[in-house]
């Protein structure tokens, strides 16, 4: 079954697994999200590996950008 796996395939699989683990760790470390949201992201990342990780990454990056904008525009009064 695994006879045709070359070194490149194994490397891609390992990188992708590392990205999934990173995504799951970041999901559960986020204190701003409810447990329900964390569970839903976990299911999405595990059930839909590529789409789940990409969706989480986009959501995470947009959230960080929004936080920076909110911090930089602070109170002006």
Image (spheres, grey):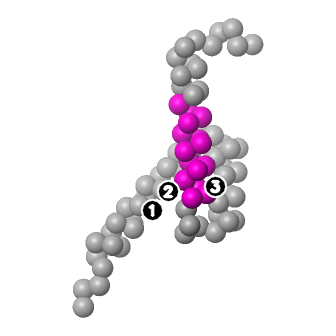
The alpha-carbon separation of the residues under discs 1 and 2 comes to: 6 Å
Question: Does 18 lie within the magenta span?
Answer: yes
Question: Does 21 lie within the magenta span?
Answer: yes
Q: Residue at x 55, y 14 (%)?
A: 7
Q: Residue 53: which numbered mark, if any?
A: none
Q: Earlier in the sequence, mark 3 or mark 1?
A: 3
Find residue 28 and report its image quarter.
bottom right
Residue 33 image point, x, y percent: 59, 67
Q: Is residue 51 visible?
A: no
Q: SS at mark 3?
A: helix
The residue beneath circle 3 is: 41
Q: SS at mark 2?
A: helix
**In this view, 26 is above or below 51:** below
Badges 3 and 2: C-beta atoms under 8 Å apart? no
Circle 1 Cα neighbour tier, 10 Å, few/some/many (<14 / 14–19 / ≥20)? few
Circle 3 Cα neighbour tier, 10 Å, few/some/many (<14 / 14–19 / ≥20)? many
Q: Residue 59: which numbered mark, if any?
A: 2
The alpha-carbon separation of the residues under discs 3 and 2 comes to: 10 Å
Q: Is residue 46 left or right of residue 22?
A: right
Secondary structure mostly seen in magenta is helix
- The image quadrant where one finds the N terminus is top right
Circle 2 Cα neighbour tier, 10 Å, few/some/many (<14 / 14–19 / ≥20)? few
Find residue 47 and report its image quarter.
top right
Q: Residue at x 35, y 73 (%)?
A: 70
Badges 1 and 2: C-beta atoms under 8 Å apart? yes
The residue beneath circle 1 is: 63
Q: Residue at x 64, y 69 (%)?
A: 34
Q: SS at mark 1?
A: helix
In this view, the residue farthest toward the bottom is 77
Q: Residue at x 28, y 76 (%)?
A: 73
Over which residues does the magenta segment extend?
Answer: 15-29
Q: Earlier in the sequence, mark 3 or mark 2?
A: 3
């Amino acid at each position: 079954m695994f006879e045709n796996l070359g070194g490149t395939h194994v490397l891609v699989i390992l990188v992708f697994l590392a990205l999934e683990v990173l995504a799951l760790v970041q999901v559960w470390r986020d204190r701003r999200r409810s447990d329900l949201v964390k569970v839903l992201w976990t299911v999405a990342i595990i059930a839909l590996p590529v789409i789940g990780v990409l969706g989480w990454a986009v959501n995470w990056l947009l959230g960080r950008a929004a936080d920076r904008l909110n911090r930089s525009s602070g109170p002006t009064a």
